[in-house]
Amino acid sequence: MILREFLYVDTDKVRAMLAQLDGGIAEEERETSTQEKRSTVGPRSFAQHLQVAGSERYTQKSLGDALFPMLEEALESEGVLKDVSEEASDPSQWTSGDIKAIAPPGSLVRITAMGSLFDTRYAASVFSAFASVALGLQGMGVNLTPDAGQAAPGKGKGRGGQQGPKPPRPGQAQPDRQLEDLIPDFKGFGGMDGDSLRSIIRMARGIFAPGLHINLSPVDSGDVLIGSRLQEGRQYLDTEADILFARYGTEPQEWTLVGSVGSYGSEDTAVPDFDFFRPDGAVNRVRFADNINGLMKNLGGMGFIDLPQHPGFSLIPFAVYRTIPRFSNLVAVRD
């Protein structure tokens, strides 16, 4: 029996898939009773008193932990779920394009590989905390750089060189704040300052749309990325990003993803010519949409936006988990 530590389960997809296979599933067992007591007191002259008594007890037994293993076993028995971990770890499968034939878009796969979590929002909050520490040290007179005693050009000396946002003029709308706006100005520290960290976050929120991602790197060279965005609000993903990173860290570790292949990064990343007019001057809507998508493919191929990059693919996750090792196996491996 395999014990799994789930990071994420899309219970809606799991239930829907099981319903197709088994014609319906048990959701929960529930036992209820109620108990309630209320007292309403009005002005003394009216002497109003109201008491309502009852009882309430609610017990719910969730079958969430059992749902996904049931689905995984059922899909394997039906021959529609393939484990591609071995093939994905072979660089030749990617260079030859065979991996796309093995796991075409829409196929259900399971892949176990080294991977790490990434969330642009968390990175922005960490950089903001780092900047606050740097400002605090500067405010205490700690020299962070040889020229820390001199204010940066165009920046005041107060509050360690921090320069807050300018207030809007009367009648002027306050601009929308972005993630990088969380990072205050501070003087150089270890080759970094507020501007450099804000630039990193600007890049990060374009390359990885804000949200929790899990990025698998099945090939040792790191040239292949299997990306999966974990949708918030699903079971087992109900924890704040800072708690998730505090628990799992930022270092790569072995994860198992089960889901359907979304799309592969396109090899053809040529910039379209944007010729989308008909001879009569009307816009050809099909060609216009194709041109826009072609431009996005180009940007995705360059790694500038949150799209799969050749030769990797995106995975629509049903579940993400770690396998819990047994101590007997660990002792055997050590010996």
Image (tube, grey):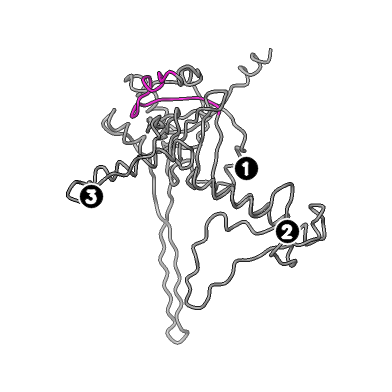
Residue kind at label 2, given as amino acid type? Leu
Residue kind at label 1, given as amino acid type? Ala
Q: Are marks 1 and 3 in contact (CB under 8 Å)?
A: no
Residue 250 position within the rendered picture, expressed as x and y whole percent measured from the top left: 61, 38
What is the span of residues highlighted in magenta in the rendered image? 96-114
Residue kind at label 3, given as amino acid type? Val
Secondary structure beneath disc 2? Answer: helix
26 w.r.t. 161: above or below:
above
- In the visual, does 256 lie left or right of 327? left
Disc 3 from disc 2: Cα separation? 55 Å
- In the visual, does 149 lie left or right of 39? right
* Camera-side mark, 2 or 1: 2
The 10 Å Cα crowd at callout 3, few under 14, some 14 to 19, many 20 or more, is few
The 10 Å Cα crowd at callout 2, few under 14, some 14 to 19, many 20 or more, is many
Seen at 66% across and 59% down, the residue is 185
Between 335 and 124, the residue placed more toward the observer is: 124
Disc 2 from disc 1: Cα separation? 24 Å
